[in-house]
Amino acid sequence: MEPLSFKLNTVRDTPKDEHLYPGSSMCAGCGAQTMIRLFLKVIGKNSIVVNAAGCMTLLQTYPLSNLSTGWLYTAFACAPAGAQGIRDALDSLIDQGKIPDEKINVLVLTGDGAAYDIGLQSTSAAMDRSLDFYYLCYDNEAYGNTGFQESGATPYASKTATTPVGRVNDIGTLKPKKDLFEIWRAHEPSYLATISPAYPMDLMKKVEEASHLKGPKMFIGFASCPTGMGFDPSLSMRVARLAVETGIWPLKKYAHHEITHTILPKFTPVEEYLKVQNRYSHLFNPKNEEAISRIKEQVLLYWKKFGIVPKSNSHS
């Protein structure tokens, strides 16, 4: 696979071509749709998207499409297997001289339900085979397309349709969020990164950087979700930015056997992030100091592993 023919240094270098057009069935303020738009700006229309069942399946409502790329829909568990079939077929056709020998990208697109849970086995197998593909997980931290039920990505203290707050449980989700970054990193992919729609240049630079490498190129994106997380659609980018500024969503990459944080957080108090989302409203009426302190502790423990400690007392 050839690398991209341009270099992203400033926002002026952003490719002007659009490959995700207006008019989809997605919810207003969908952070995932913004990430996909930016992702496709970089890899271009000469791509085939392999989509596992989830929210983004609504991008394609037969017979209409608002994408300039190819599209294959699969069941929850098998998008990476579908990507393998497409990659093998393309390579075979190129070898036979039936199609031009040119860059054709294969992009797996899944939500956290498929990435963290149902499709983890097929993703592991694809990485183990060193499949040359991109994988974008839009992580809205629940099974969003079927009513916002708990997934392996759901963070501690978030209420979901299957972890409601009531007399028996006043916390919501009791388990911590699964660390998919580390699970994927154990496979030693060619490239691995976290991204956010609120940091478009960071996102596009990572995709551009990954294009120079052959093999699995894995991305986990924070998908701010007004419908499931519970906030006004106009606040979508603010929520995504607060996730990074509080240190809850680290922006980082793993390449050449090294982890690098690409944006360092301001360590804004975590309450600023939590209180704007209905899924955490039970932590403030009345205020649950114990649960909020536990969330702060999780953030601190993560950053301390990398020798980064907040300068302020926002997380104390």
Image: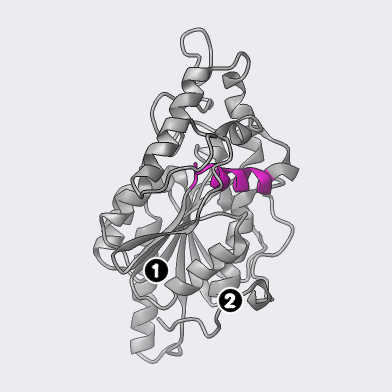
Could you tell which of marks 1 and 2 lies nearer the N-terminus?
2
- Where is residue 71 drawn, in percent x and y? 53, 65
50 falls in the magenta region: no
Depth check: give the residue in front, 198 or 266. Answer: 266
Residue identifier under label 2 = 9
Secondary structure category for the residue under label 1: strand
245 falls in the magenta region: yes
Image quarter for residue 197? Answer: bottom right
Image quarter for residue 232? Answer: top right
Which mark is on residue 133?
Answer: 1
**98 vs 130: above or below:** below
Decide if residue 48 is in sight here.
no
Distance between the Cα atoms at labels 1 and 2? 24 Å
The amino acid at mark 2 is Asn
- Where is residue 173 drawn, in percent x and y? 45, 25
How many numbered marks appear?
Answer: 2
Q: Residues within 10 Å of mark 2 (few under 14, many from 20)?
A: few
**View extreme (top): residue:** 167
The amino acid at mark 1 is Phe
Span colored in magenta:
236-249
Left or right: 89 in relation to 112: left
Left or right: 100 in relation to 91: right
- Where is residue 282 drawn, in percent x and y? 59, 19
Residue at 41 percent of width and 34 percent of height: 298
Secondary structure category for the residue under label 2: loop
Mark nearest the camera among 1 and 2 is: 2
